[in-house]
Image (cartoon, rainbow, N blue to C red):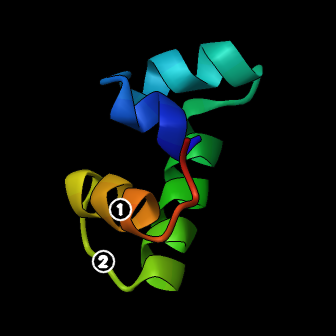
Amino acid sequence: MLRLVGRGLTNAEIGVELFIGEATVKTYLLRSFKKLGVSDRTAAVMAALERGLLS
């Protein structure tokens, strides 16, 4: 999901790509933010890149 965020997709577009609802995308992203210790989409992608979670 963070890979799609990194490509600039909106929550709605990510939902379409993954066949899930926009609200589910939002929930998953918020949980990812908490696990990564960040508060927004940009910081989440940067943290994931720094940790080698995205290739």
Q: Are marks 2 and 1 in contact (CB under 8 Å)?
A: yes
Q: How many tags in the picture?
A: 2
Residue 5 circle label: none
* In-image side of 37 versus 14 (left or right): left
Which quarter of the figure is the C terminus placed in?
top right
**Could you tell me which secondary element the residue under label 1 belongs to?**
helix
Residue 41 at x, y percent in the picture: 29, 53
Q: Is residue 33 above or below residue 34?
A: above
Residue 52 at x, y percent in the picture: 53, 62
Residue 50 at x, y percent in the picture: 37, 66
* Residue for badge 2: 38
Q: Is residue 8 above or below residue 30?
A: above
Residue positioned 35% across, 68% down in the render: 47
**Could you tell me which secondary element the residue under label 2 belongs to?**
loop
Please state which of residues 41 and 46 is positioned toward the viewer in this rendering. 46
Residue positioned 54% across, 48% down in the render: 54
* In-image side of 11 versus 22 (left or right): left
Q: Few, some or many C-alpha atoms within 10 Å of disc 2 (few <14, some 14-19, many ≥20)?
A: some
CA gap, disc 2 to disc 1? 6 Å
* Residue for badge 1: 44
Q: Given the image, on which type of amino acid does mark 2 rest?
A: Val
Q: Is residue 21 above or below residue 40?
A: above
Residue positioned 56% across, 71% down in the render: 31
Please state which of residues 5 and 29 is positioned toward the viewer in this rendering. 5
Residue 11 at x, y percent in the picture: 44, 31
Q: Few, some or many C-alpha atoms within 10 Å of disc 1 (few <14, some 14-19, many ≥20)?
A: many
Q: Is residue 43 above or below residue 55?
A: below
Residue positioned 59% across, 41% down in the render: 1
Q: Given the image, on which type of amino acid does mark 1 rest?
A: Ala
Q: Which of pointers 2 and 1 lies earlier in the amino acid sequence? A: 2
